[in-house]
Image (spheres, rainbow, N blue to C red):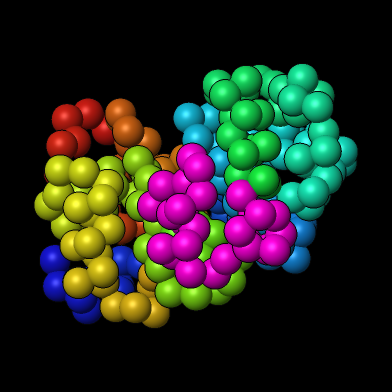
Amino acid sequence: MDAATMSRVIARLQRRAPTWDTTALMAISAETGRDPFRILIGCLLSLRTKDETTGPASARLFALAHTPAGILGLPRPEIERAIYPVGFYRTKARVLHRVCGDLIERFDGRVPADLDALLTLHGVGRKTANLVVTFGFGLPGICVDTHVHRITNRLGFVRTPTPEATEMALRKRLPPRHWIGLNDLLVAFGQNCCHPTSPHCSTCPVRTACARVGVRRSR
């Protein structure tokens, strides 16, 4: 699929997006005034966790503390109770303490806007780093999670075996004006329409342009 067609597909999805449920991380971004720290923490909590769990867990934690020093000052069992039942909540409580300590010791308590610097933080991979760069700082980046990897391959934007390969391919092919909003758009699309199995192709706004790669059954 060429760049012009990708742009038309994205434009169609953007027109439909207001009818979809808001993603947990977009809600955190909006509610916190795009605070990079709370977006970082929300993203760490969201890993292997559904949005309906991530949002309330983040809210409970931020009601207790919403700065690196504040979270570092919370006993780990208190963090665990606040974020339960996110996936791997005990491990994530340890990660949050370590990340907050890193931010205080190495970055003066501030979240860095640089992708490479973010990747030096414990537990932060490319997905999380790109989300912080785009959601928290409004800087160019392409966050590729399982939704974005699956959907861009299904649509025919790319043909790649892994999320990291998808990110690199999109950086080469997708017009930069679409980078920042791509993750939230496709995550919402995946949650509301383009499901992993049996997607709602009959009501999909881009069904005529979709390559339907890997689709064996649809509604």
Q: Position of residue 96 (x, y in %)?
A: 64, 38
Residue beneath the point at 57% across and 66% down: 112
Q: Position of residue 117 (x, y in %)?
A: 47, 62
Q: Is residue 54 visible?
A: yes
Q: Position of residue 58 (x, y in %)?
A: 72, 39
Residue beneath the point at 74% across and 50% down: 68
Above or below, comparing residue 152 to residue 99 in the picture:
below
Observer-nearest of 205 and 112:
112
Residue beneath the point at 51% across and 49% down: 121
The N terminus lies in quadrant: bottom left
Which quadrant of the view contains residue 209? bottom left
Observer-nearest of 51 and 8:
51
Q: Which residues are magenta?
A: 102-129
Whether residue 53 is in magenta: the answer is no
Which quadrant of the view contains residue 197? top left
Q: Position of residue 160 (x, y in %)?
A: 14, 49
Is residue 66 rendered to the left or right of residue 108?
right
Q: Is residue 50 visible?
A: no
